């Protein structure tokens, strides 16, 4: 036994010396590691006085294979290329390409949306201003609605999914505006008296517009009748299709849970089903509605405390079961809570799939407190999301599969507006700057 132990000790010392000699030689040749002469020198020094018998006993067949200089050179080039690509990838994933500052008098950015072709960014502000900006540089193209001292914030805006020249914008004054981008004009589409509209969306077919706000009711408007520009149409709201509002006299009934009872802050229309709407707000519930059903929501998810544009849908790739095509939909929610703010829900069952807590997010006394959460447009598989708020201090790109933050973009104040088009990301909030970033 002692003899075997001594032999192993000798072999270990021999092998350690070989590794040390190789590493020392490599360090001395760092300045010229790609040249063929240097590679040959490393090869000759390392293999010159190698104790073949000892190594063969230790490593078996490995020492029988001779590595050519060409193969060594190829390996060096491969490693070098991978390192360069790795460095470039990290750099590109965290690149803010543009920062455009705007006056403090605009009172913060409330919404930013890319057009369907990514050429235009529509922005709305706390001063009631509506602007169009270049989708690549963020530079101002035109101001559709100017700021007024008495104006309330224009809280959200959406492009028409089919008529690309139409933009809808909703205000805390209770008005919804139609903006025509081809001839740069706007007019009042709807006025909801004594209401503040916080959320707006247009369904995939462009048939109707859904709005919600202070009065906790979901209103659905016919988009076609918006083309009639008369005072009677504007002020009598003759184009209202449905008003989903809880009857105050029936608060204790079971039907009461099918409606919101506090402010609505987020509305999202389904990307493939033109009749489905998802809403959320201060009452810690997210509700699914079907416009064909007139007596309230059809499903509810309890938990998310929504305070901004923090609901998004991801229609997964269809699967075929027994010759029938099924498309699963995931619902993403971002809550204004200190922790466990990012969650994914199953659309069909309204059950929680998971709460996403990135493993590499640093602990902070500021909490999370998300105002905005959206799926990243540059990932068709729905594995990446964008989140921002008042606690994280960043706009984060989160990989849902890895449960990790893969990119961060600095924000000095609360972020309430986030959108993406392919690899481009636009974001902003209470800081007077619009940032455009790129994540590949």
Image (spheres, grey):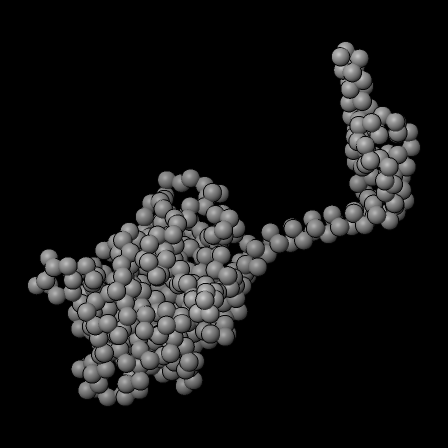
Vertical order, 41 against 322 (above or below) = above
Residue in front for this viewpoint, 72 or 101? 72
How many numbered marks does the figure carry?
Answer: 0
- Residue 372 occupies quadrant: bottom left
Q: Residue at x 8, y 63 (%)?
A: 249
Q: Quadrant of the C terminus?
A: bottom right
- Image quarter (top left, top right, bottom left or bottom right) of the N terminus: top right
The quadrant where residue 51 appears:
top right
Residue extending furthest toward the top:
2
Residue 46 appearing in the image:
yes
In this rendering, position of residue 29 left or right of residue 157 = right
Q: Is residue 83 left or right of residue 313?
A: right
| Residue 200 point in image, percent of width and height | 31, 70
Indicate the position of residue 129 as horizontal and vertical percent values: 34, 71
Q: Which residue is at 27% across, 87% downward? A: 229
- Front residue of 191/41: it is 41
Image location of residue 439, percent across then percent down? 54, 59
Residue 386 location (% of width, % of height): 45, 57
Instruction: From the viewer's perspective, tell me whether residue 182 is left or right of residue 277.
Output: right
For the residue pair 321 and 223, the one nearer the viewer reads as: 321
Residue at left offset 43%, top offset 74% = 132
Residue occupying image coordinates x 37% and y 72%: 273
- Judged from this view, the residue extending furthest toward the front is 322
Note whether residue 146 is visible. no
Left or right, residue 45 beside residue 362? right
């Amino acid at each position: 036994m002692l003899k075997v132990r001594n032999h192993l000790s000798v072999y270990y010392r021999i092998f350690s010396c070989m590794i040390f000699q190789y590493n020392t030689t490599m360090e001395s040749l760092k300045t010229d590691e790609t040249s063929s002469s240097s590679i040959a020198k490393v090869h000759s020094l390392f293999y010159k006085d190698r104790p073949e018998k000892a190594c063969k006993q230790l490593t078996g067949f490995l020492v029988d294979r001779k590595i050519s200089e060409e193969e060594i050179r190829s390996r060096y080039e491969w490693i070098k290329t991978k390192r360069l690509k790795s460095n470039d990838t990290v750099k590109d994933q965290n690149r803010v390409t543009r920062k455009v500052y705007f006056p403090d008098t605009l009172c913060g950015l409330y919404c930013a949306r890319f057009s369907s072709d990514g050429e235009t960014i529509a922005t709305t502000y706390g001063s009631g201003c509506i602007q169009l900006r270049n989708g690549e540089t963020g530079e101002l193209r035109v101001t559709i609605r100017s700021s007024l001292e008495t104006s309330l914030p224009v809280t959200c805006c959406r492009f028409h999914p089919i008529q690309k020249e139409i933009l809808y914008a909703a205000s805390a004054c209770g008005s919804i505006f139609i903006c025509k981008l081809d001839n740069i004009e706007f007019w009042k589409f709807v006025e909801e008296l004594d209401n503040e509209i916080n959320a707006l969306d247009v369904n995939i077919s462009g048939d109707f517009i859904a709005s919600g706000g202070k009065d906790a009711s979901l209103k659905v408007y016919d988009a076609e009748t918006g083309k009639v520009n008369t005072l009677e149409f504007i002020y009598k709201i003759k184009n209202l299709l449905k008003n989903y509002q809880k009857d105050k006299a029936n608060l204790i009934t079971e039907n009461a849970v099918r409606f919101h009872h506090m402010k609505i802050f987020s509305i999202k229309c389904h990307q493939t089903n033109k009749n489905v709407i998802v809403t959320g707000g201060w009452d810690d519930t997210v509700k699914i509605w079907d416009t064909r059903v007139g007596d309230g929501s059809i499903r509810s998810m309890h938990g998310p405390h929504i305070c901004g544009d923090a609901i998004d849908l991801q229609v997964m790739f269809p699967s075929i079961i027994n010759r029938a095509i099924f498309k699963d939909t995931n619902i993403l929610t971002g809550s204004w809570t200190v922790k466990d703010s990012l969650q994914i829900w199953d659309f069909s069952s309204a059950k929680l799939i998971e709460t996403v807590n990135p493993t590499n997010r640093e602990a902070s006394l500021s909490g999370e407190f998300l105002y905005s959460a959206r799926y990243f447009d540059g990932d068709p598989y729905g594995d990446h999301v964008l989140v921002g708020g008042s606690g994280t201090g960043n706009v984060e790109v989160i990989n849902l599969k890895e449960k990790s933050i893969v990119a961060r973009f600095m924000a000095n104040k609360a972020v309430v507006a986030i959108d993406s088009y392919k690899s481009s990301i636009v974001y902003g909030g209470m800081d007077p700057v619009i940032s455009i970033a790129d994540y590949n």
